[in-house]
């Protein structure tokens, strides 16, 4: 099995065009990362960068989050590594990617997202502080990357979620990464820690406050933006063979089955720390229609991540964008962002 390779860069590429500053009713400002739409494609579901442009009009997208990039190339887990379940998908891809060197050479300088006003968020994964810092340091100097998402919550690789459930380790990691990323917004993608200790608000606080010298475009020691949440650790077994349905044994659950869980995570983090700290949230988990996206907004999300739904139907982000715009107008909002966190609890 070979590592997936991005398209080779042509000898000469077209010049990059200036990205327009979005100002429409669906535009979103994520801590200085200005988006023309609140819809963000989730890491691992839309290729490395601009592959989605073959099947989806870019005007409905605010950003694309590329595959998680590691210091060295990874082949990932063998098949089967993705199976459909009732109301969900179970996957254990294993962070298959081309590595930072080829990403920097063949993806960042050649993608066409910026010509359509769509931002590229580069996802970064690792298993040690040094491995994260190495990749992030490279990302900071790449013109084609608009923001970096720190994946501290992948349940499908050894050590992939260790940082996301240990506040002390997360504080150290985010502080080191923030120091290595002085020029771009930092998004931290958290795991679905719904109950028990340490609890999702404690984890979110660690990501925001971090441990280090304030840095980056917003002068923070930690995350500029939070992403809630990564897939939920899960398992499926074939009763006939008595074996797990994916080769890795366990994997990450995504799709409609996790949506209500993520609504609560967003609500808890928004009211527990993000609102007071002015840290926007990207809601991610099971959105397939505008009503589910609207729930995320009401709970406290400023932007909507979509992943599993786009694998089933690549046109679904367009319908969600249109439905959200109509809903916001019917609610009397001039901009969608006026409705963030406006759930009525009494």
Image (spheres, grey):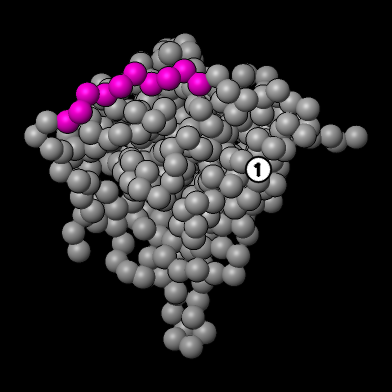
Which residue is at 41% across, 27% downward? 117
User: From the image, which quarter does the N terminus lie in?
Assistant: bottom left
- Residue 24 left/right relative to 331: left
Q: Is residue 151 visible?
A: no
Residue at the bottom extreme?
Answer: 240
**Whole-percent x and y of residue 62?**
48, 32
Residue 132 part of the magenta segment? no
Residue depicted at 45% across the width and 69% down the height? 83
Highlighted range, magenta: 13-22
Q: Residue furthest left?
A: 11
- Residue annotated with mark 1: 323
Identify the residue shown where x is 17% and y is 34%: 105
Most foreground residue, 246 or 110? 110
Per the picture, the main secondary structure of the magenta-coloured stretch is loop
- In this rendering, the answer to whether 251 lies above or below 341 is below
What residue lies at 55% left-to-right and 19% top-to-bottom?
Answer: 23
Quick one: SS at disc 1?
helix
Q: Quadrant of the C terminus?
A: top right
Residue toward you, 113 or 43: 113
> Camera-side residue: 286 or 115?
115
Please identify the quarter of the rendering in which residue 79 is found: bottom left
Give residue 163's position: percent from left, percent from top: 45, 39
């Amino acid at each position: 099995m070979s590592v997936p390779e991005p398209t080779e860069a042509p000898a000469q590429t077209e010049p990059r065009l200036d990205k327009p500053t979005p100002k429409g009713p669906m535009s979103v400002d994520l801590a200085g990362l200005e988006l023309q739409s609140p819809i963000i494609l989730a890491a691992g579901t839309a290729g490395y960068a601009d592959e989605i442009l073959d099947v989806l009009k870019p005007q409905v997208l605010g950003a694309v989050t590329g595959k998680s990039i590691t210091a060295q190339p990874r082949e990932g887990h063998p098949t089967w590594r993705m199976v459909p379940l009732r109301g969900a998908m179970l996957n254990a891809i294993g962070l298959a990617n081309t590595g930072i060197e080829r990403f920097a050479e063949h993806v960042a300088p050649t993608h066409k997202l910026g010509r359509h006003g769509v931002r590229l968020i580069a996802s970064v994964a690792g298993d040690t502080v040094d491995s994260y810092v190495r990749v992030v340091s490279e990302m900071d100097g790449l013109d084609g990357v608009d923001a970096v998402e720190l994946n501290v919550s992948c349940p499908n690789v050894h050590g992939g979620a260790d940082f996301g459930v240990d506040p002390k380790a997360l504080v150290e990691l985010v502080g080191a990464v923030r120091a290595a990323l002085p020029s771009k917004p930092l998004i931290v993608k958290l795991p679905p820690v719904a109950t028990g200790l340490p609890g999702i608000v404690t984890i979110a606080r660690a990501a925001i406050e971090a441990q280090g010298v304030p840095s980056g475009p917003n002068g923070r020691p930690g995350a500029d933006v939070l992403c809630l949440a990564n897939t939920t650790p899960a398992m499926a077994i074939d009763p006939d063979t008595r074996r797990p349905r994916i080769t890795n044994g366990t994997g990450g659950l995504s799709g409609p089955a996790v949506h209500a869980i993520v609504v609560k995570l967003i609500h808890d983090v928004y009211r527990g720390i993000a609102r007071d700290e002015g840290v926007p949230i990207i809601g991610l988990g099971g959105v397939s229609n505008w009503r589910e996206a609207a729930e995320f907004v009401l709970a406290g999300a400023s932007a909507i991540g979509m992943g599993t739904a786009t694998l089933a139907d690549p046109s679904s982000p367009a319908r969600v964008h249109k439905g959200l715009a109509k809903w916001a107008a019917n609610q009397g909002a001039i901009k969608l962002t006026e409705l963030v966190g406006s759930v009525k609890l009494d």
